[in-house]
Image (tube, rainbow, N blue to C red):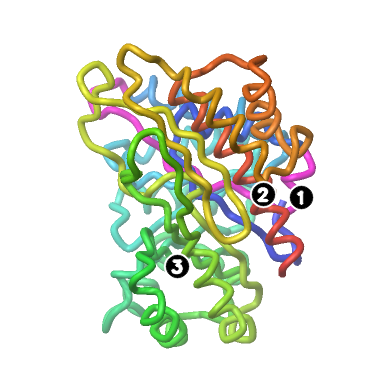
Amino acid sequence: MLGEKNRYISLLKQKAGELSAVRDLTPGIWDSWNPLFELLAEENLAQPVIRDDAISEISNSCRNGALIFVDFDAVDFLTANIIGEILGGLEQRGLIPVPVVSISSNQQIRTAVNAFINNNNRARRAGVRLFFGDPGTNTAGNVNDLVNATGLDVEASHLFIDLEFINSDFLPTLTVAFPAIVAPLPYLADWNSVTPVGTGFPRILEIPGSSNAQIPRTEWELFNSVRGQLSNQVNRLDFGDYAVTNPELIDNFDPRTMQVSPKVIYTADASWIAYKGRSSRGRGFGETLAMCQALVQRPEFLGGNYSAGDLYIYNRAQNIATQGNSGTWKRVATNHHITFVANQVANTL
């Protein structure tokens, strides 16, 4: 549940690795963390199937009573009725769904959000997601359009300022520019919370096979550089990221024809430690044994008791856990990341 204390928000795709990582979180993490799920589905699927899958997958992953944000922009072909049924179904399964809208959200999404948050005496809260490319001369008008179209209560609602991928080369410029761009945003001091969101995690991990590297967590560096300037302008400043996923999905990925390499990703204070193996074709994910054996020897490794992801890494290093597959290691990395960053935010803000 969102309260007065600063929170950590993870933007997660509705994919198996991320969902299972959430399911494996310890209950205490939910005291300082909330997910924002981006719903995903193939347009050729029947809409009732999409509805039932979304309700089942998300509710089976989240703690009962949890507040979750739900973004429909990637499934904007859904009817307003189906969107409303997804939100209502999540509520019936014991969750507190908060719909998210953006400037690009279509009329179906806006209509569904309006109907949901203004029905049955619910709190008229929603999430408004502004992408960094959105602010401009008409930002105030666009935000007011969203407020009016949905009927949301600004003081009960949440503003997400999404920078998507943050290139480390642009950090010095962004550190100066970001507060200046945020300052004139509408209702800045009135939102229940304001959350900068972004990531330094690359779309493609371009390091050689059988090697490792450290990737800077540019989103955390930027946040800490600007939070002093932003904190006194907002009601509550939260931190958001994309966990261990780049915002841009790789289109037309077919594991039957495209090369997949085993990767073990581990979040540390200011970077990700990334191990990458050779192509799994003909080798499987056996190289994760040596990767995990190297990782558990590093001072950054927090021990098998730290999270479910850490336990899997520890057991893999002992050759107890199986080699897994891409989904396994996405789950492991995401579970550790959420646990680590939730604790990092709780101890920092």
Marks 2 and 1, the one that precedes in the sequence = 1
> From the viewer's perspective, is residue 50 above or below residue 283?
below
The reply to whether residue 106 is visible in this rendering is yes
Position of residue 38 measured from the top left corner of the image (x, y, whole percent)? 43, 43
User: At numbered mark 3, what does the secondary structure look like: helix, strand or loop?
Assistant: strand
344 vs 55: above or below: below
| Mark identifier at residue 161 | 3
Residue 243 x, y percent position in the rendering: 52, 48
User: Does 159 lie within the magenta span?
Assistant: no
Q: Which residue corresponds to the image point at 42% horizontal and 52% vertical from the top-left? A: 201
Residue 119, visible in the rendered structure = no
Task: Nearest to the eye among marks 2 and 3: give it.
Answer: 2
Label 1: how many Cα within 10 Å (few below 14, some 14–19, many 20+): some
What residue does disc 2 label? 300
Q: Image quarter for residue 228?
A: bottom right
Q: Nearer the viewer, mark 2 or mark 1?
A: 2
Residues shaded magenta = 27-46
Gap between marks 3 and 1 measured at Cα: 23 Å
Distance, label 2 to label 3, CA atoms, is: 30 Å
The amino acid beneath tag 2 is Glu
Q: Around disc 2, counting alpha carbons within 10 Å, would you say few (fewer than 14), some (14 to 19), or many (20 or more)?
A: few
Give the image quarter of residue 212: top left
Q: Mark 1 points at which residue?
A: 31
Picture residue at 56% right of the left edge, 70% below the top: 194
